[in-house]
Image: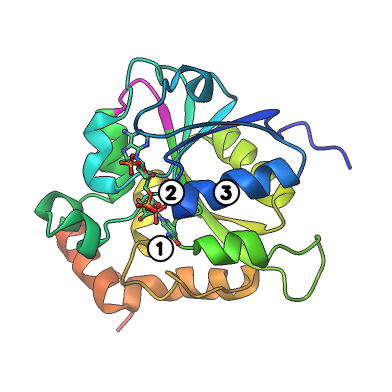
Amino acid sequence: MDTPDLPRSVGVLGVGRFGGALARHARGAGLAVEVAGSADDPAAACACDVVILAIPLARYRALPAGLLRGALVVDAMNHWWEVDGARPEFDDPRTSTSETVQAFLRESRVVKAFGHASAWEVENLPHPAGHPDRRGIAIAGDDARDTAVVAALVDALGFDPVLAGPLAAGVAFEPGTEIFGSDATAAELREMLARFPESQRGRVVARARHGREGGAR
Ligand SMILES: NC(=O)c1ccc[n+]([C@@H]2O[C@H](COP(=O)([O-])OP(=O)(O)OC[C@H]3O[C@@H](n4cnc5c(N)ncnc54)[C@H](OP(=O)(O)O)[C@@H]3O)[C@@H](O)[C@H]2O)c1
């Protein structure tokens, strides 16, 4: 298969449940993978074609912004209350959590993906393209070339990429949304994305961002 967008190397920052699962699975899929935990030098991981962020979101300010300058960064992090605590900056409906990470990593190109899937799903539910049970992974990013690279990575890992729109659209697959943890196919994900503006969270987001409800009433 011709996959010109597929990254040759993948860095993973954070080697816990999720980062560990992603790294093992990416290696198994034949990709070159560099990982870095909190006590490691992150330089090699940050030099990879794509760098996946898999640390607790509340610690995003510890990310090596200098090493990530110019990098394509995949934000797989979520605001998880049990771990991160209540953090108003992550609940502000005007800003998706990935936009907050992008504002910190202002010289990187952040794309949101993978975070709505579980570590278990990533390792245990990949399927070849065309398989009826193949799950989808939603992708939000501002640059079409970057989202194409992330889509190729998602596909290589055994999932169907679903382009959801710009980085701000990632709010539709944060915790608490219908998509989060749904283990859905690509077709189901597209339906959920289309329904998001009419969900409770979707209406709150639309009011906060545009001063009006998002969905048809
Ligand atoms: N678990 C899932 O199924 C799942 C699914 C989707 C998304 N996520 C997201 O993935 C992220 C990680 O979740 P997790 O469940 O894997 O948590 P976890 O098991 O607690 O692992 C987090 C890892 O991040 C490391 N870390 C912390 N700060 C770091 C830094 N500055 N640089 C490098 N590594 C650092 C921690 O190392 P130390 O212990 O040494 O601090 C730890 O190994 C979270 O944002 C979560 O919302 C998780």
Identify the amino acid type marked 3.
Leu
Name the element at disc 2.
loop
Residue 22's label in the rendered image is 3
Residue 16's label in the rendered image is 2
**Residue 183 forms part of the magenta stretch:** no
Identify the amino acid type marked 2.
Gly
**Disc 1 versus disc 3: distance between alpha carbons?**
19 Å
Range of residues picked out in magenta: 105-109
Query: 10 Å neighbourhood of mark 2: few (<14), some, or many (≥20)?
Result: some
Query: 10 Å neighbourhood of mark 3: few (<14), some, or many (≥20)?
Result: many
Q: Work out which residue is located at the far front of the displayed protein and give it.
A: 39
Classified by dominant secondary structure, the portion drawn in magenta counts as loop
Nearer the camera: disc 1 or disc 3: 3
**Disc 2 versus disc 3: distance between alpha carbons?**
10 Å
> Is residue 15 something that shows in the picture?
yes
Name the element at disc 3.
helix
Measured from the top left, where is residue 93 in percent x and y?
19, 58
Nearer the camera: disc 2 or disc 3: 2
- Colour pattern of the rendering: rainbow
Identify the amino acid type marked 1.
Phe
Residue 173's label in the rendered image is 1
Q: Nearer the viewer, residue 78 or 44?
A: 44
